[in-house]
Amino acid sequence: MATVEYRQTGCVGLFDTDEALARLSRLGNPLAKLSSAVDFEMFRPLLEGRMLNRGRKGPAGCKPRDVVMMFKAILLKRLYNLSDEQTEYQIGDRLSFKEFLGLSSGDRVPDARTLWLFQDRLAQGRLGEGPFALFRARLEGLGLIVNEGKIVDASFAEAPRQRNGREENEAIKSGAGAGLWADAPHKRRQKDIDARWAQKDGVNHYGYKNHVKADAGSKLIDAYAVTSAEVHDSRAVDGLVVAGDAGQEPCGDNAYVGKATQEALRAKGVVARVTERASRGHPPAEAQRESNRLKSKVRARVEHIFGFACNSMGGLRVRTVGLLRATLAIGLANLAYNLCRYEQIVRLGLLPVKG
């Protein structure tokens, strides 16, 4: 049987790339929208100040990659939930990725090892919070951190599940995991002794937890904290809610209803509005149900943040080992969400933006 081949009807043109990019923009290229709304050069002073080796004695050797381009490549990893290898492949394969990074067809694509090393240097230098704080200050300067109420909640960040023996797991739980696999250093580097198991609604989770404080008016993430998965939501809220939040009545679900949590917040002048729990055998009264309904209307807005991470970003997962690297990955995911939310606010005119 003869093979039917596709017959080309066009020819290679000088402006093919420009026309392809214009077509992608008309179809709604999200990266083009993000590039038009966000000036990523704002991160250059911070990144160059901490990432570049200022002690080079000469021009010999491989020249460093542009730090803003590499930072944007790491953000692509978080936006599309990609591994280092897949990020390298997709940058080389997708025109929209190259355009977002400012790469031309003749530029060398950063390989998976280069991406891993850059992200690890960010983690070891504890630079995850710097870009987030920088962009958060930009949002506040534009009047997008409305400060008319806060929402606190947490979500699991799944990590690769470990296959350890019972004694090894007991040692990790007791805090003695650092002494394990001393005779197998290569195996030790692959073992995550910081991640933990947790169960919610009958579902087991393994990894870490992303605790966020969001601005109720704009649905932007105002602050975050990263812990292992077994840490209760209420244990992180004391560090998220600050004295400057007094008068904004942070909303949360009944995980924050505990007496110790409420007292810690009151010490900062903050009165939280959390949904009340019904006790066994005592269904909530009508007034309590109405109060919970009103609080939930505000609190539910934080689910839009986690919904974006789950649906648009392919889920909040980490592909790293250890709390230090997980903190960076989750922090960059929170930054990626704020960048996309800011683009949406500007494009749709949802909130007034100053000058």
Image (cartoon, grey):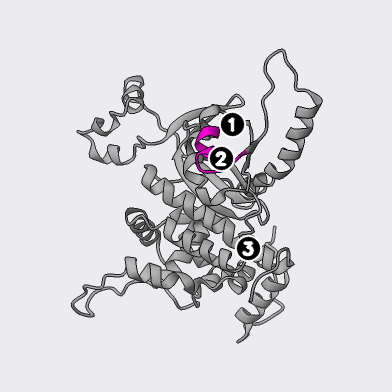
Q: Quadrant of the N terminus?
A: bottom right
Q: Is residue 266 above or below residue 67?
A: above
Q: Earlier in the sequence, mark 2 or mark 1?
A: 2
Q: What's the residue type where badge 2 is placed?
A: Ala
Q: Earlier in the sequence, mark 3 or mark 1?
A: 3
User: Does the segment drawn in magenta span residue 271?
Assistant: yes
View extreme (right): residue: 286
- Asked if residue 209 shows in the view, the reply is no
Q: What's the residue type where badge 3 is placed?
A: Leu
Residue 11's quadrant in the figure?
Answer: bottom right
Residue 287's quadrant in the figure?
Answer: top right
Q: Which mark is residue 154?
A: 2
Q: Earlier in the sequence, mark 3 or mark 2?
A: 3
Q: Label 1, on which residue? A: 255
Residue sitting at x 47%, y 60%:
133
**Horizontal placement of 96 versus 7: left or right?**
left
Q: Which mark is residue 88?
A: none
Which secondary structure lies at badge 2? strand
Q: What's the residue type where badge 1 is placed?
A: Ala
Q: For the residue carrying disc 3, how many other residues have a C-alpha within 10 Å: few (<14), some (14-19), or many (20+)?
A: many
Q: Which mark is residue 144?
A: 3
Q: Nearer the viewer, residue 7 or 72?
A: 72
Q: For the residue carrying disc 1, how many other residues have a C-alpha within 10 Å: few (<14), some (14-19), or many (20+)?
A: some
- Asked if residue 176 shows in the view, the reply is yes
Residue sitting at x 62%, y 26%:
201
Magenta-tinted stretch: 262-272
Marks 2 and 3: in contact by CB < 8 Å?
no
Marks 1 and 2: in contact by CB < 8 Å?
yes
